[in-house]
Amino acid sequence: MNYKEIIEDIHKTVKSGENDGALASYIPELANVDVNKLGIHISTVEGFGFGTGDHLEKFSIQSIVKVLSLSLAFKIVGEDIWKRLDVEPSGTAFNSLSQLELDNGIPRNPFVNAGALVICDILISNLSNPKEEFLRFCQNIANNQELKYSDKITTSEKSVGYRNIALCNFIKSYGNILNDTDIVLDFYFTICSLEMSCQELSRIFLFLADNNFKGADGSQILTLSEAKRINAVMLTCGFYDESGEFAYRVGLPGKSGVGGGIIAIHPGKYCIAVWSPRLNYKGNSYRGMKFLEKFTTKTESSIF
Ligand code: DON
């Protein structure tokens, strides 16, 4: 498969096509990003890697981090984690409050903000230095490459974090947040601020595509069965109320973030990361979705 040629070709088409949508300006700092950025990078289980456009530029990965926080929490707690949250698609926006009341404070899945906050609470209960240990977990997967949280983005999101503050307090009222809400929110905003390039993202998320993937310390990150489960939740819930559309158009497990990034995993084959900051009205990268639809169509490489 000539991934290089196919990616270069689609990059050209998408770059010259329409760039619809809007920046995630509800986080003030994210409104300062250049809307013309477009980066792509693929990493295969055979060790091939190729990127083009703005693939080396770091951006705010936002909700993509929820896959990493879920992976660590699942590794620590195991199946018992599902006593605190579910694995069902929500059919609602990423920041929705409405289902929580009907579901007695049990979030629908770990990728809506409500579920990600519960995962943060679980990590805080299980780690002595959550921010440092979470970063170390990510860096181990990234072959010890240095990764950084952005104080600027954390502070910016915190200053307007009313919706997440409400969500966290609401879940706590049902007894499903055990730690202090300020501590949970601070950890959540901090991990969402992690910055990575498409190249780094596509390499790090290979752990969900490659059974033989090892961290820098030589250990396996997740068992085959654990990786299967994380990929399943990505397929059904990774794009909120657009998860069905992503599965229909792209046909891969994936996860988006309001920074405009998307990762998509082909288990056994590759991980591809795309970045284009403008979002469609469901909060997913407009050109990122377009790119990936064309990519799996041209390469005939979806999981279906
Ligand atoms: O909590 C928020 O609103 C952001 N930190 C993350 C949201 C996000 O990335 C949703 N993804 N498409």
Image (tube, rainbow, N blue to C red):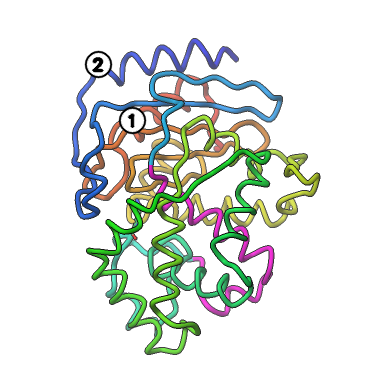
| Relative image position of residue 25 (x, y in whole percent) | 20, 49
Q: Amino acid at mark 2?
A: Ser
Occupied quadrant, residue 290: top left
Q: Is residue 202 above or below residue 108?
A: above
Is ligand 1 less than 8 Å from the beta carbon at label 1? no
Q: Secondary structure at mark 2?
A: helix
- Tell me the quarter of the image containing the C terminus: top right
Relative to the observer, which residue lies in front, 184 or 108? Answer: 184
Residue 290 shows which numbered tag?
Answer: 1
Q: Give above or below for 47 relative to 9.
A: below
Q: Earlier in the sequence, mark 1 or mark 2?
A: 2
Viewer-nearest of discs 1 and 2: 2
Q: Contact (CB < 8 A) between labels 1 and 2?
A: no
Q: In the rendering, at what x and y percent does residue 287 appear?
A: 30, 31
Above or below residue 269? Residue 193 is: below
Instruction: State yes or no: residue 71 in magenta.
Output: yes
